[in-house]
């Protein structure tokens, strides 16, 4: 099945998600978060922002309400694109800009000491081992627990993201696989 382009933003790709509470499946743009219930004709006029959709259905406006439909894509990243400043387009929606900026600015590639330190903390947390709680870098701080990983922008206190530690590890693995397959980018 070939990817479907988003008619709202034109640059995004639609991916299939499941609303955890209702089991309804949605097509959601990886760039602008426009959604369409599965089976509905995808047009510009029928697009609904995912937050609006969730709130209209009595749910909190949060990606925690959704899970990726099996086998369709990674929960946090659909694709990686790189430029001179690292990751330039990777977020599933604007909330995850914190994550892409963190990977681009502070982790600086899979070979960096910061990357190895964060990766080790995530693996330790998932195996139940104690984790350092002072993971602070140039622009971001990271707190890793067995359940959640929180990334906070040190220059803008309003920019923070909490994701499950398991999903964060999967994101790091996807990043490593991309870097390995595309060494020149």
Image: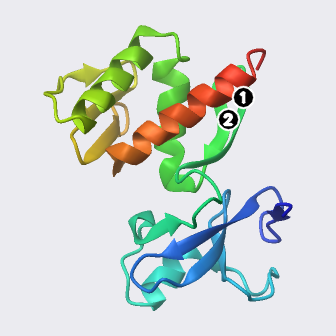
Q: Label 2 to label 1, Cα distance in Å?
A: 6 Å
**Residue at horizontal 37%, vertical 31%?**
155
What colour scheme was applied to this rendering of the protein?
Answer: rainbow
Looking at the picture, tell me which residue is in the foreground, 100 or 125.
125
Farthest residue, direction left = 130
Q: Is residue 28 above or below residue 59?
A: above
Q: Which residue is mark 1?
A: 82
Picture disc at residue 10: none
Earlier in the chain: of badge 2 and badge 1, it is: 1
Q: Is residue 113 visible?
A: yes
Q: Is residue 101 visible?
A: no
Q: Is residue 124 left or right of residue 168?
A: left
The location of residue 14, given as percent across then percent down, is: 73, 65
The location of residue 95, given as percent across then percent down, is: 48, 54
**Residue at horizontal 57%, vertical 64%?**
70
Q: Is residue 116 left or right of residue 125?
A: right
Looking at the picture, tell me which residue is in the foreground, 30 or 167.
167
**Residue at horizontal 45%, vertical 65%?**
63
Q: Are marks 2 and 1 in contact (CB under 8 Å)?
A: yes
The location of residue 97, given as percent across then percent down, is: 53, 45
Position of the N terminus, as image quadrant, is: bottom right
The location of residue 128, given as percent across then percent down, is: 17, 36
**Residue at horizontal 34%, vertical 50%?**
164
Position of the C terminus, as image quadrant, is: top right
Q: Residues within 10 Å of mark 1 (few under 14, many from 20)?
A: some
Describe the element under mark 2 as helix, strand or loop.
strand
Q: Which residue is mark 2?
A: 88
Tell me where residue 142 sits by quadrant: top left
């Amino acid at each position: 099945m070939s990817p479907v382009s988003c008619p709202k933003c034109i640059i995004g790709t639609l991916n299939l998600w499941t609303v955890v509470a209702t089991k309804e499946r949605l097509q959601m743009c990886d760039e602008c978060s426009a959604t369409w219930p599965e089976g509905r004709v995808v047009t510009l006029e029928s697009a609904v922002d995912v937050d609006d959709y969730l709130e209209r259905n009595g749910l909190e406006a949060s990606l925690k309400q959704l899970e990726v439909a099996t086998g369709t894509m990674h929960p946090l990243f659909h694709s990686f694109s790189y430029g001179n400043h690292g990751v330039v387009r990777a977020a599933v929606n604007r909330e995850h800009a914190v994550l892409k900026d963190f990977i681009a600015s502070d982790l600086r590639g899979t070979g960096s000491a910061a990357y190895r330190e964060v990766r080790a903390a995530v693996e330790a947390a998932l195996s139940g081992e104690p984790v350092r709680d002072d993971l602070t870098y140039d622009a971001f701080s990271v707190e890793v627990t067995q359940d959640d990983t929180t990334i906070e922008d040190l220059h803008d206190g309003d920019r923070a993201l909490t994701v499950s530690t398991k999903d964060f590890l999967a994101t790091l693995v996807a990043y490593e696989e991309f870097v390995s397959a595309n060494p020149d980018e």
